[in-house]
Image (spheres, rainbow, N blue to C red):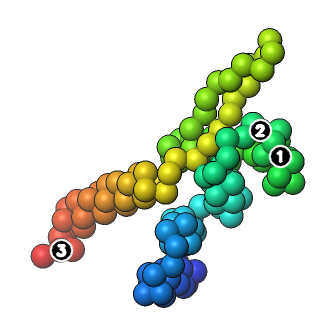
Amino acid sequence: MAMKVDKLTELKVILKKKQKPEKILNTIFLFLGFKNTEIKLYKLLLNKKLTINQIKKRMNVTERTIRGHINSLLEKQLITRKVVTEGKRLKYVYSSVPIAKAWQIIKKQIDKTMEETNRVFEKMNLLS
């Protein structure tokens, strides 16, 4: 729990200093338990559309690791996948959703979690 508190404190400091949205989102990702590699991948794909092989070369991690993080970010709807034709081959090209959309997705998840927590607390009579 101490790490989450530290991240919350860090977030408050970043917000007071009016840091760039990317820095704020990065801290929120960490607070929510995203892995560092997921965050790096999201940031890499924010300005570039890349294949898995291109990602592998830039991040210097195994293809298996990249695929795992890509699947996680796809499930969270923070990156998109598009099929492109290269000669006779089909490839997937990945890109991140814009920061504004990522924030909407994360905020929706946070709101849903808060509502679920509130319902549990009400059932347990913790809010009376």
Count residues near mark 2 (Cα–Cα under 10 Å), then give few for <14, some for 14-19, many for 20+: some
Q: Earlier in the sequence, mark 3 or mark 1?
A: 1
Residue 28 in view (yes/no): no
Comparing labels 2 and 3, the label whose residue is closer to the camera: 2
Q: Are marks 2 and 1 in contact (CB under 8 Å)?
A: yes
**Real-space CA distance between mark 3 and mark 1, rounded to the nearest whole angstrom:** 49 Å
Residue in view at x 37 percent, y 59 percent: 107
Q: Are marks 3 and 1 in contact (CB under 8 Å)?
A: no
Count residues near mark 3 (Cα–Cα under 10 Å), then give few for <14, some for 14-19, many for 20+: few
Comparing labels 3 and 1, the label whose residue is closer to the camera: 1
Q: Quadrant of the C terminus?
A: bottom left
> Which disc is residue 45 wearing?
none
x, y (%) of residue 66? 75, 45
* Residue labelled with disc 2: 52
Q: Amino acid at mark 1?
A: Lys
Q: Is residue 37 positioned above or below 71 on the image?
A: below
Q: Earlier in the sequence, mark 2 or mark 3?
A: 2
* Residue labelled with disc 3: 127
* Residue labelled with disc 1: 56
Q: Nearer the viewer, residue 126 or 61?
A: 61
Q: Is residue 34 positioned above or below 50 on the image?
A: below
